[in-house]
Image: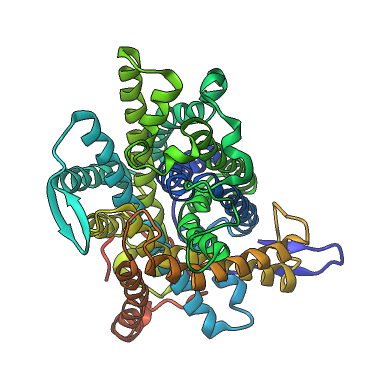
Amino acid sequence: MTDVSSSGEHDELVYASAGLPKTTNWWGAFVIGLAGTILVTGIAPVMVTSLGAASIPVIVVITISGYLVCLVLAELSAMMPDRSGGLPSYAYPAYKDRWPRLAEHINGFTAWAYWLGWFPVGPLNMILASFYIVNRFVLSTSGFTLIDTPIAWWTVGISVVGLLLLAIPAVMGLRFGTVFATTLALLSMIPLTFLAISWIFNPGVVDFGQLFHFRHTDGSGFFASQFHHGWLTLYIAFSFLLTWNVIAMEAAACYIGETRNPDRDAKIAMNLEGLYGLFIYTMIPVAFVLVIGVHALGNATLADPKTIFVTFSSKVFGAGAGSNILNWLIALMLILALILSALNAITGTARSLHQMSVDGQFPRFFQKVNKHGVPNRSMWFNVACSIAVVFMGGAVEIYTFSNVGYLASFIPVLIGYYLLRKHRPNVRRPFKLPEWMKYVALGIAGLYVVIYFYGGPVYASCSCSQAGHSTLVYYFIGIATLLSYLGFYAYRKLFENKRYPAQAEELLGPTPAPIAGASDP
């Protein structure tokens, strides 16, 4: 990790290693990271049925920011090839030299915020999968109501069983998980990609006029809004919802630390993830607008966001017996895609919790790895928390709860990238972006600050969302969950480190690789 600059200066970036085995390559990181990109199945229907064609420019701008984040992470992950847990694990080394005491909290808080952002993807996607299963089998939607959100019994049952089954490949190791994820990716992303461009083969169902002036579902123009705060605030508020989804392409970075050749694998995996995400996040909503139409998208009977992909395929490929078979295939493809994304939510954030524990901000309980090199206790912790989130029942409610953490985790990392480029220019960088990218990173951080602190509360407090009511209570549940980090941190520092002073890790001290299956002291 030593670099020699052109001026002969040396610089070495020192950090605690996660100690996880190197068992995969760029393909493994890419296909498991597709779990982030698959979130298009949840966000595209919500955006187009809420904003119509006006959602397209907003989606494009935020998705481009997500691709640029992927490039930043490609550089950071190649610089720190032994870190695990993705985006949050790169924060600490950027701050440690200038603000060492603050840096420790930035490290722990960023990882915990990232965990809050990602683990709810598992229950959310199982909930979405249950909608398609219920729709295809015409099952009863009776259930109960929790905090203004109706929840069907089938949703709870399918989601809980699905999460428990996904825990099996999750604890079997990244090599097994890669095979499992590759199978799901091929069965879901190829059809999803075809669906994004399927209208090209049936131009008769397409109306390009639906994109002109990027109109809302009520026919008003892009700059006209009935929202009492005005059009700009409306788009900033929906960007809070959007950032939970379209910047999730960064998920591939969670596994760069477990690739055999991170110098090469980081740039390939992150570039592919970002470019494919840019394509799919743009083309799916564009396809909905062109085929279904802006006015119809505003009618819940004509375009139910829960099953809009089936509606779309019926319009593109026609009705009849053949169409019914196709609708079954589309539903199956979406279910597989959602399962892949849920798998990543369990596996990726487990590595974040493991890295936090290794770094010294989280209880030692989360350090243990099993014989497959998997932080299994962290994995089961994720499963248990995911089952609890199932009872939130609705997509928008979970978006609001989860993004309180997710978007917050990006800001210190993007600022940290700027600091590393400015103050540590001679550190070894196998993949190096142009110098001006450090200012782009700052600009994206500034954009996310506005969306987080202004757009988030506005979105949660109004009824402009698909939820049809304020989701502010879920916003505050997210805040409470985020602050619970302080309790875990205090337990580690005040109890565990005093109980085992000889084994109390310093954040940058030598950290041996965990012994597979070993018990904690």
Position above or below: 116 against 297: below
Q: Residue at x 27, y 67 (%)?
A: 520
How many circles with numbers are drawn on the protein? Answer: 0
In depth, the one of 68 and 257 nearer the eye is 68
Q: Quadrant of residue 357 in the image? A: bottom left
Does residue 12 appear anywhere in the picture?
Answer: no
Position above or below: 19 against 189: below
Q: Residue at x 12, y 49 (%)?
A: 143
In depth, the one of 215 and 311 nearer the eye is 215
In depth, the one of 425 and 345 nearer the eye is 345
Residue ranking furthest to the top: 321
Position above or below: 455 against 504: above
Q: Position of residue 171 (x, y in %)?
A: 30, 47
Q: Position of residue 46 (x, y in %)?
A: 41, 48
Q: Position of residue 429 (x, y in %)?
A: 70, 57
Position above or below: 475 against 328: below
Is 431 placed left or right of 289 in the picture? right
Is 439 placed left or right of 358 in the picture? right
Is 409 placed left or right of 340 in the picture? right
Color scheme of the displayed model: rainbow
Residue ranking furthest to the right: 7
In depth, the one of 76 and 10 nearer the eye is 76
In the rendered image, which quarter contains the N terminus?
bottom right
Is 3 placed left or right of 167 in the picture? right
Q: Residue at x 27, y 71 (%)?
A: 521
Does residue 386 appear anywhere in the picture?
Answer: yes
Q: Position of residue 67 (x, y in %)?
A: 61, 50
Q: Quadrant of residue 10 in the image? A: bottom right
